[in-house]
Image (cartoon, coloured by chain):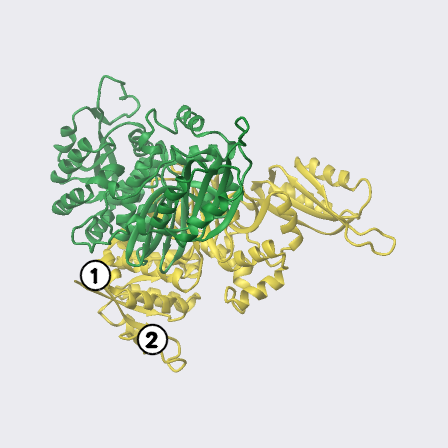
Chain colours: A green, B yellow
Amino acid sequence: MQQVSVGLVGLGTVGAGVARILTQHADRIARRAGSRIDCKWAVVRDLNKKDRRAEFEGVRIVDDVRRVIDDPEVAIVVELIGGIDAARRIVLDALAAGKHVVTANKALLAEHGPEVFAAARAADRAVAFEASAGGGVPIVGAINVGLAANQVQSLAAILNGTCNYILTQMTQEGIAYDAALAGAQALGYAEADPTLDVDGTDTAHKLAILAQLAFRANVKTADIPREGIDRLDLADLKYARELGYTIKLLAHAKLAGGALELRVAPSLVRNDAPLAQVHGPYNAVRVVGDAVGDTFFHGRGAGMMPTASAVVADLIDVATGRALLTSRVLDFWSAASPAVPLLPSSRSLRRNYLRFLIADRPGVIAAIAQILGARGISIASVIQHEPAEAVGDEPGPVPLVIMTHLAVEEDLREAIREIDGLDVVRAPSVRLGVEE
Amino acid sequence: MQQVSVGLVGLGTVGAGVARILTQHADRIARRAGSRIDCKWAVVRDLNKKDRRAEFEGVRIVDDVRRVIDDPEVAIVVELIGGIDAARRIVLDALAAGKHVVTANKALLAEHGPEVFAAARAADRAVAFEASAGGGVPIVGAINVGLAANQVQSLAAILNGTCNYILTQMTQEGIAYDAALAGAQALGYAEADPTLDVDGTDTAHKLAILAQLAFRANVKTADIPREGIDRLDLADLKYARELGYTIKLLAHAKLAGGALELRVAPSLVRNDAPLAQVHGPYNAVRVVGDAVGDTFFHGRGAGMMPTASAVVADLIDVATGRALLTSRVLDFWSAASPAVPLLPSSRSLRRNYLRFLIADRPGVIAAIAQILGARGISIASVIQHEPAEAVGDEPGPVPLVIMTHLAVEEDLREAIREIDGLDVVRAPSVRLGVEE
């Protein structure tokens, strides 16, 4: 049986998982790849940090990536260091040296997809990236191959396990954001600096990738309007739940009248929808295709072995030769693709959850309803919740929750601005979209 | 751009859907296949039955399959006639003539997988079968490619949309089986003769296929213990629901101590498990892999366009050349595969739902508990329900529901036999397994 030599760049959590599958299950992998996949090299940043030779017998552990790129025996370079600049250099150098590339690097693809795939085409090599979105959920293959007969109409996804874990804790245990984040960090579900997760950037990276696959959209992360979960108030999760909704951090993409709507934001999902049932550090993707209708994919979003599962699936796909055929045909991030225009976020149309903190006085609801009505925004329901504690003689302010029917974003923004300017409104309002 | 000519054998619901995608979305399909997929031929049984030339412009509609098989231009034959004997002949003839084959025929693969794939290997042609299990859910590709790094540990699936529609109606609307079946027939979800659906045969065909993919098991349908939904009593759905479970017709496969447990049976699924949330004519598959953990795939299980979506995905996979690479490597139904022994059903271990109809008299529960206990079967809970109407002076019999802890199947069968022989037991008992 033929042998395919692989160089792993990065031997962190995922890299170690990949090395473990390749060494402990070599026969199984060979049977499915049609050749023995030999993990010949592993590149680490600091050779002195930890002696890992015993753990990965037969793997040459070095700190110089050129050893891998200059080795003519190596057919596939696996980039697992994350980040953008160094990873970009390694991927481009590997392609220039005639290697195929497997990467889990969503930031790299989201920011430099066109450059990476132009280099892949020039070298006639595959870049495989199943692990870059959805963790262990094989969503990249599902869109590229399994659902290839379809024009995807819309896509809604939970793509960040850290955020979903935090939201699940907040929803199920009634814990506030800061405490839930601290718990996630203690369990290893959130990093010491969780900014890129909780502010929606990581989700936007992954959405940029899925939008390329499903819609051939060539968007950068900065093109995607995004909100994180870091300013979510526990009260809104509770009020939403009373209305029959769960709040999830969603990546949303939808074709609407020839334009593509993209967004990352905490959104209300009906409790009985599959996305609302995604708990803890899981990921899930709902894809609606014009032929297949709605499909739903669910699994672990991150972690050592689930991500390694996706990376090794890519190694097998490259070793069989399939990945190169896919790369050649699908022309990822090609300038030749017809560009899908993005829908300006001001034009997006959706139902909304609004919460105002108002003075407990007659006429306030009427004033708010009048401002919404003047901009053509219909109200589906109004619930006035229990007031906060009184301050002296003045009764405490009252949370007022309004669900709207479909509203155009810019009309809604103007209405909210006007409402927030009323002297009976006690705090900036909260607005969350509803995912249909 | 190159052209690939296709012959469709069968122009029923799914065939018409395939022709529609190929003709109405030719450019899209070409972009993803790397060649134009031309639907050159469609073979129907009776040319006089319906004139379909206007509907499928450019497609030559004939009633002789040899026209397709003898056409050297045709590269791919799509078999969509269903059934076994004629379909087998067409598939083998097409392979012998050097064509690739796409088929949605689960019965054919479940019964003649070894012969079909031996012929494919001899001809070095691909047989692609995404539509044979799971309808629009791309589960075949997920197991073969997306999860290829894993040893699948277990699989639990809803694979028959007709049964799931009927069970959903029974559960949600409280309709008895016969009425729910009639409703499904009226809506086109069930055929005039629904036997193969409702008795579990269709699910067993699909499980035989998934068991080959996930475990390299070479089983015939007859090897799979199966029960259908046709004898389910509404009362059991209701009692199960009160205990926190939903009853679904499940295909179940699990590696246990080196042996493979296979089963098709109505089973209790916890209400909060994703499989319990699968409603109406949908299919879903839960796959647990050793690296990825648990994954879940959900979508429409049948119908014109969802199934056509899977068939056209296969056409694209064949046209790109990927399907042949997959066929060559994965060696489907090969005699060279190491055989996985099947676990005898008498040795299977699971929790159970038991319902007895007993005389409303002191000591009966103790007698039943004693029989179970004598065979080492522990009781998790006992609920005595409202009695049926009295008959004369005799009080009506009482339904007694017992949930057991894990029990070995043959112990349980013996205990049930003994209990059913008690003179205080008024009807044969009901037993349903619990899916963990």
Q: Are marks 2 and 1 on the same chain?
A: yes
Residue B275: x and y in percent read 50, 47
Residue B271 visible somewhere in the drawing: yes
Q: Which of A241 and B381 is in front in this view?
A: A241
**Residue A246, numbered circle:** none
The residue depicted at 23 percent of the width and 63 percent of the height is B27
- Residue A258 is left or right of residue B199, and the answer is left
Query: Mark 2 belongs to which subunit?
Result: B
- Residue B115 is left or right of residue A319, and the answer is right
**Quadrant (top left, top right, bottom left, bottom right) of the N terminus of chain A:** top left
Work out whether B391 lies above or below A157.
below
Say what secondary structure mark 2 lies in: loop
**Residue B35, numbered circle:** 1
Nearer the N terminus, badge 2 or badge 1? 1
Q: Indicate the amino acid at tag 1.
A: Ser
Q: Nearer the observer, disc 2 or disc 1? A: 2
Q: Indicate the amino acid at tag 2.
A: Glu
Which residue is the site of mark 2?
B55
- Residue A20 is left or right of residue A277, and the answer is left
Work out whether B407 lies above or below B120.
above
- Give how far apart the Cα atoms at labels 2 and 1 are: 24 Å
Q: Which of B376 and A246 is in front in this view?
A: A246
Work out whether B251 lies above or below A430.
below
